Image (cartoon, grey):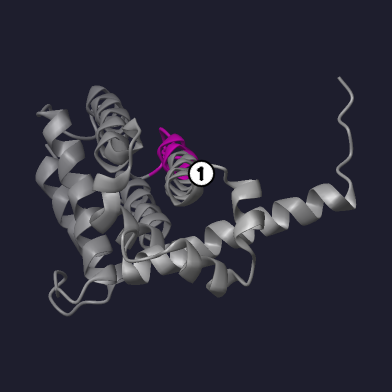
Amino acid sequence: MKKVPRTSRDLQAAERRAQILQGAKELFAKHGYHGTSIRTLNKHIEITDGLLYHYFPGGKQEILETIFQETQAYRVKIMDDLIAGIKPGQPLEEALYLLVSGMVKTMAGDRDFLKIMLHNSESIMSEDKNFFSKMILQRSQALTDALAHRAKDGEIREMDFQAAAKQVVSIGIMAVFSEVTELNLVDNSDVESYLKNMVTFTVSLWRK
């Protein structure tokens, strides 16, 4: 089926919609979902009530749901690409470092979304509120399978691969929280050095 080209009006509408979502994300992260009124949102974006409800008839709730849905879809794709990038002949330390480093950049790169997810998930009405835990569990399973293949090839010993996968993911999560909070969870190391050292140490424990 031939793709219909987008008109200038379509592009303008898409830009306005993106502007509303970005403005809402900034305010929700700073003031919280309940601390942000429609009036405050409209003033921040410089639009009218009518225009906001034209794009999001469900108002503030629909905007919050949309932010979660669209942002999580992007992050899931990135995480899947990272895991798929673990090639059979690639050194395990290198593969896992690239995985956790990419995970940290993907999750900590959008701090506004992470703040919303941590502090406003109770306001999400759909199943998206459990997105973070689901994403981690699903990606951990893919990593579990990858580690099992490495053991079959004799690169690492037999072990509880599910626990090993969660251990790797936890390295990234520690770095993410260190990046977006004031908690020092990486012993004053820069994040890249922390990730490299932890991955190298972890893999050394798996060697035969």
Compare residues 68 and 97 and report the one nearer the observer. 68
Residue 21 in the image: above or below residue 126: below
Residue 79 painted magenta: yes
Q: Position of residue 171 (x, y in %)?
A: 20, 54
The residue positioned 50% from the left and 42% from the top of the image is 58
Residue 81 painted magenta: yes
Q: Position of residue 70 (x, y in %)?
A: 51, 44
The residue positioned 32% from the left and 52% from the top of the image is 100
Q: How many marks?
A: 1
Q: Residue furthest bottom?
A: 188
Q: Please name the amino acid that badge 1 sits on.
A: Glu
Residue 88 appears in the rendering: yes
The residue positioned 15% from the left and 50% from the top of the image is 202
Side of 146 relative to 13 (left or right): left
What's the magenta region?
77-90
Compare residues 2 and 179 and report the one nearer the observer. 2
Side of 52 relative to 139 (left or right): right
Q: Quadrant of the C terminus?
A: top left
Q: Quadrant of the N terminus?
A: top right
Q: Position of residue 38 (x, y in %)?
A: 47, 61
Q: Residue furthest top?
A: 1
Compare residues 3 and 58 and report the one nearer the observer. 58
Residue 203 in the image: above or below residue 108: above
Residue 67 in the image: above or below residue 152: below
Side of 194 relative to 7 (left or right): left
Q: Which residue is mark 1?
A: 70
Residue 109 appears in the rendering: no
Element marked by disc 1: helix
